Amino acid sequence: MSRRVPQPAVERIVDPAARPLVVGVVPGQPALVTLTAARWAAATRGALHLAFVDTARYVVDEQPDGSVRHASLDPDGADDDWRTTEAELRAWAEGVLAPTHVPWSLHYLAGRPDRALTHLARAVDAAAIVVGTRAPGTAARMRELLEGSVAVHLAHHQHRPVLTVPLDVVDWSQTRSPWGR
C-alpha cells in the first residue's frame, strides 16, 4: 500500500508570528545567512534554531525535540572530532548573534542536510527554513551537480517556505542562459 505524501496547502501554512526559523549553518559560512535569519526572526518575534548537519556522521535515532543521536561513518576514526566543530560553531554564533538579542540555539545534526533540516523544522514547528547559496566556483558547481542543492531538495520535499540567502551573485551580462543574455 502506497502512503500519500502530505502536500503543501493553505491549511498547512505555518503562521510566522512568534515561530522559530531553522537556519542551516556550516563552518566558514559568511555571517550574512545567520544575520538575515536573525532580522526575520526579530521582525516576527521568533527564535533561531541554527543547525549544522555533519554528512560524515549518520543518525542513530531522532528525538521529538529535533535533536539526534549520531555516530561516525568511519568506524576507525576518532569519535570526538564533532565536539570541536560544535564548540567552534557555538562560539562563532555567540559572536555573530550577540548584538541582535534574538534567542537562538545550536543543533548538531547528522546525515543528509535536507532531511535533517526538515526533521528539525517539523520538531520545532518552524515557520521557514533559511539556507545560504553555495560559494561560486568549479568545485562548488561540481558538488551541487553530484549532491544537488540543499535549497532545491528542501523546496521539493517539505511544505515550509525556504528562504535562500545569496552569498555571491553573477553579473547578468556575464551569464549565458537558454533565454539569451
Image (cartoon, rainbow, N blue to C red):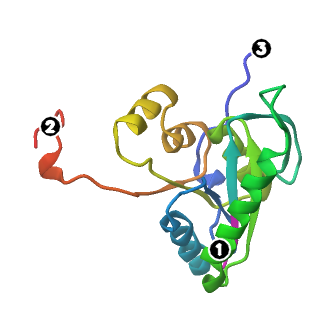
Specify which label sits upstream in the sequence, 2 or 3: 3
Question: Does the magenta segment cover residue 47?
Answer: yes
Badge 1: residue crowd in 10 Å (few <14, some 14–19, many ≥20): few
Q: Position of residue 106 (x, y in %)?
A: 75, 62
Specify which label sits upstream in the sequence, 1 or 3: 3
Q: Residue at x 52, y 67 (%)?
A: 31
Residue 1: assigned label? 3
Q: Nearer the viewer, mark 1 or mark 2?
A: 2
- Mark 2 touches mark 3? (CB < 8 Å): no
Badge 3: residue crowd in 10 Å (few <14, some 14–19, many ≥20): few
| In this view, 151 is above or below 104 | above
Q: Position of residue 125 (x, y in %)?
A: 74, 58
Q: Residue at x 52, y 43 (%)?
A: 155
Q: Which residues are magenta?
A: 45-49
Q: Return the residue nearer the eye: 142 or 19.
A: 142
- Residue 19 appearing in the image: no
Q: Residue at x 65, y 68 (%)?
A: 92
Which amino acid, mark 2?
Answer: Trp
Quickly name the residue at label 1.
17
**C-alpha gap between disc 1 and disc 3:** 38 Å
Which amino acid, mark 1?
Answer: Ala
Quickly name the residue at label 2.
179
Q: Position of residue 148 (x, y in %)?
A: 49, 32
* Element type at mark 1: loop
Question: Does the magenta segment cover residue 36?
Answer: no
